[in-house]
Image (cartoon, grey):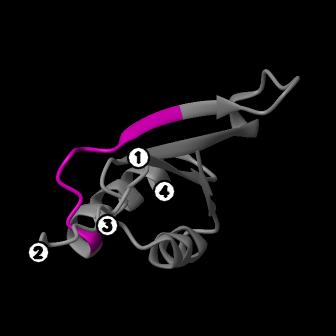
Amino acid sequence: MSEARHVRHVRHVRHVLVLPDRDTAEEVAEALAERFGVAEEPQLVRDALAGEDDAEDAQWLVVVEDPDGAYDPAGLDGLAAEYEGWREAE
């Protein structure tokens, strides 16, 4: 008899943590390594709000690549919320 193999399909996920400023984004990027073991350094991106040119109206994004779907979305939500932000999955 042949053994049935179960293949788990994992979809590559990109988590985007939206944060209020650069300093906060840098703190969250450091916390990701400590709490979640994120090995690849997250990308920090300035995201100006639509129609706004003022730097104070910019949000900062921390982009976390999760090719194996290993990072707990609820944990990432909680981390972002601690810093007055939120998580979006792409």
- Three-letter code for the amino acid on which mark 4 is drawn: Thr
Instruction: Using the image, tell me which numbered label, if any, was put on residue 12.
Output: 1
Q: Nearer the viewer, mark 1 or mark 3?
A: 1
- Number of numbered discs: 4
Tell me the CA gap for discs 4 and 3: 10 Å
Q: Are marks 3 and 2 in contact (CB under 8 Å)?
A: no
Q: Nearer the viewer, mark 4 or mark 1?
A: 1
Q: Residue at x 58, y 45 (%)?
A: 90
Mark 1 or mark 2: whose residue is earlier in sequence: 2
Q: From the image, tell me which residue sits under label 2.
A: 1
Q: Nearer the viewer, mark 3 or mark 2?
A: 2
Q: Is residue 24 left or right of residue 28?
A: right
Element at label 2: loop
Q: Main secondary structure of the magenta part?
A: loop
Tell me the CA gap for discs 2 and 4: 57 Å
Tell me the CA gap for discs 1 and 2: 34 Å
Tell me the CA gap for discs 1 and 3: 22 Å
Query: Does 39 appear above or below 33?
Result: above
Query: Does 19 appear above or below 85?
Result: above
Range of residues picked out in magenta: 36-45
Q: From the image, tell me which residue sits under label 4.
A: 24
Q: Residue at x 64, y 68 (%)?
A: 84
Tell me the CA gap for discs 4 and 1: 26 Å
Q: Position of residue 51 (x, y in %)?
A: 88, 23
Query: Does 78 appear above or below 30?
Result: below
Q: Nearer the viewer, mark 1 or mark 2?
A: 2
Query: Does 48 appear above or below 65?
Result: above
Q: Residue furthest toward the right? A: 51
Q: From the image, tell me which residue sits under label 3.
A: 31
